[in-house]
Amino acid sequence: MTQERIEAMRRRYPPGTEVMLNSMEGESHMPPGLKGKVDMVDDAGQIHVNWENGSSLALVPGVDSFHITDLPRAERPKQQPSR
């Protein structure tokens, strides 16, 4: 991922942004509908989230599916798996 793309993600997902999980690959204890707040976007472009269930697993854009919850539904971009 390019530095430009990572900076764009940091603007899109600033700390405190509320997200909702649609699916997280390989993590059965992370159910769809789980909410969390963004902590940071790291240098690899992973979105670190403090989840309601106490987990702090990062979202991997293009692998995990999620959306921002504080946007009107019509404006929500969904992050879809890249497969």
Image (cartoon, grey):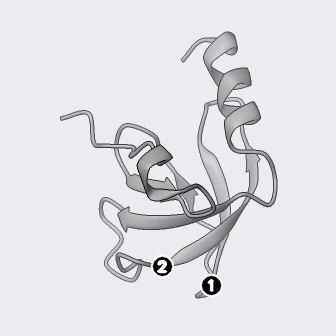
Above or below residue 46? Residue 32 is: below
Q: In which quarter of the image is residue 54?
A: bottom right
Give the tally of numbered discs: 2
- Residue 14, image x and y in percent? 78, 45
**Which element carries disc 1, helix, strand or loop?**
loop
**In the rendered structure, which disc, 1 or 2, sits on the residue that comes first in sequence?**
2
Residue sitting at x 65%, y 31%: 9
Q: In this view, does 60 lie to the left or right of 45?
A: left
Q: Which residue is at 31% across, 43% downward?
A: 80
Q: Residue 9 carries which label?
A: none
Q: Do the residues labelled 1 and 2 touch (CB within 8 Å)?
A: yes
Residue 83 falls in image quadrant: top left
Closer to us: 1 or 71? 71
Return the residue nearer the eye: 13 or 81. 13
User: Please, what secondary structure does the residue beneath circle 2 have?
Assistant: loop
Residue 76, percent across and down? 47, 48
The amino acid on which the numbered mark 1 sits, given as a three-letter code, is Glu
Q: Which residue lies furthest to the left in this view?
A: 83
Give the quarter of the figure containing the N terminus: top right
Return the mark for residue 52: 1
> Please, is residue 26 above or below residue 62 in the view?
below
Q: Residue furthest bottom?
A: 53
Q: Residue 34 carries which label?
A: 2
